[in-house]
Amino acid sequence: MGDFIKENLNPDGVDRRGFLKCMAWAGTGTLCLMQGGVLKSIALSDMASRGLAAAKGELAFVQISDSHIGFDKPANPDVIATLDVAIAKINALGMQPEFVLHTGDLTHLSKPSEFDTLDQKLKSIHTGEIHYVPGEHDVLNDDGAQYRERYGKGTKGQGWYSFDQKGVHFIGLVNVMNLKAGGLGTLDKDQLEWMEEDVKHLKSSTPIVVFAHIPLWSVYPEWGWGTDDGAQALGYLKRFGSVSVLNGHIHQVMQKVEGNVTFHTAMSTAFPQPEPGKAPSPGPMKVPADKLRTLLGVTDVSFVRGKQTLAVVDSTLAV
Amino acid sequence: MSKTIMKVVVCAVLAAELGWAAVSKTDVFTHAPSTGPVEVKIDNYNFTPGEITVKAGTTVTWVNHDDVPHTVKSEEGAFKSKAMDTDDKFSFTFDKPGVYEYYCSVHPRMTGKVVVK
């Protein structure tokens, strides 16, 4: 099992206070968890000893992100090979995840052949379903028409939707469309209204998982890593005891806990991006070939009923 | 004032002057209306130069040097490129005088301006 574990985070899920922040840079082998309001870091190497028993929850799913099929530059000239490794990791979990979330940038240039390749690859994942949200690279030139035709059946507006799985309410948001000059990711009025209505009927004890491509929280606005009206969306979730927000886009792991909300970004399966402000731009980060796979990865998420919490564990593609 | 402090002050003044000189030079370059074709580079998620002034009838060409796709989209809808992959170009001829603000619709923090006289 190596670097895979499911970990229960927090028994109450309501009284977490203050602001705790953790940045686990992909490849450092560190995982950050919240336990009873206290931040806990676990080295991936320590997790082997915990075994599969610890991984048992009532719901386990996997998040992958930013596959960028079609990208072929030196940062990673073979993004299909690294996606293959990610898929092999999922299939080697020892248990089948309920479903897989792909949080966008399926393709690099929105080409039909890129979508086809991705679809073909993802078919080999042993899982129930795959849920998607688009990244900005998936809606180039056609305002997302092709994306919605392929992945948007049953969705609303520009591709947003929600579903329930084993008592957890999942909300997939689209924040990569109609971006305004000088701005960040955006959800816009129609989607916000839909979301407000969507959660109205839910009990406050319902665990909520929100997923979207661009981080809903302000990671680094200078590089466009945030969503202008993300705070408004999160405002609708204030009464809920457990809210988890999963994003992609920034190609590295970051976690933050604020009140009842846990924020998490995932690694890319294709290429890493620099830490905020540590490079002239957020462009693909070129790293030595032997280091690349330590910067790419898969996220396993498990939910344990009654504990109102989600555990998020990242594993890199390195052996 | 000690010698060391004096040196620091002199250096700071020199740096400020050099900085000012550099800014002035750029200013002259970007604001002088030109007639020939003009190129705007896209590098590190930036339009360079970010602001240009050209005469009516000038064709401006944007070239993407980044490893990720960018677009050039006028805020008022005057022009809009397809997504440009690495080394792709997009050209637009500005026939009418005016101020054309534009941005990358994929990375909207990237903004630029073309002033046509």
Image (tube, rainbow, N blue to C red):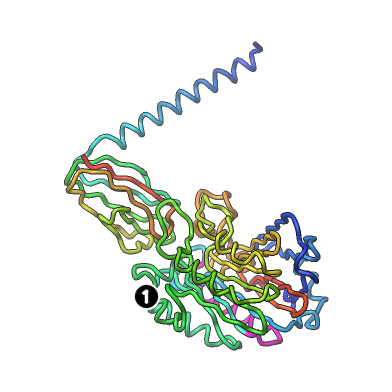
- The answer, for residue A109, to whether it is visible in the render is yes
Is disc 1 surrounded by few (<14), some (14 to 19) or many (20+) residues within 10 Å? some
**Chain under label 1?**
A
Question: Which quarter of the picture shows residue A58?
Answer: bottom right
Whole-percent x, y for residue A238 in the image:
65, 64
Quadrant (top left/top right/bottom left/bottom right) for the C terminus of chain A: bottom right
- The answer, for residue A117, to whether it is visible in the render is no
Question: Which quarter of the picture shows residue A139?
Answer: bottom left
Furthest residue in direction front, as rendered: A201
Residue named by callout 1? A145
**Image: magenta residue range:** A76-98
Q: Identify residue type, mark 1.
A: Ala
Residue B94, relative to residue A101: is it above or below? above
Residue found 31% across the figure and 31% down from its top: B28
Query: Is residue A77 found inside the magenta-colored segment of the image?
Result: yes
Closest to the observer, B51 or A21: A21
Residue A261 is left or right of residue A115, and the answer is right
Whole-percent x, y for residue A274 in the image:
57, 56
Residue A127, relative to residue B80: is it above or below? below
Whole-percent x, y for residue A193 in the image:
49, 68
Residue A42 is left or right of residue A141, and the answer is right
Query: Is residue A304 found inside the magenta-colored segment of the image?
Result: no
Residue B22 is left or right of residue A193, and the answer is left
Question: Which quarter of the picture shows residue A163?
Answer: bottom right
Closest to the observer, A247 or B92: A247
Whole-percent x, y for residue A222 in the image:
52, 49
Residue B50, relative to residue B105: is it above or below? above
Residue found 53% across the figure and 76% down from its top: A81
Q: Secondary structure at mark 1?
A: helix
Quadrant (top left/top right/bottom left/bottom right) for the N terminus of chain A: bottom right
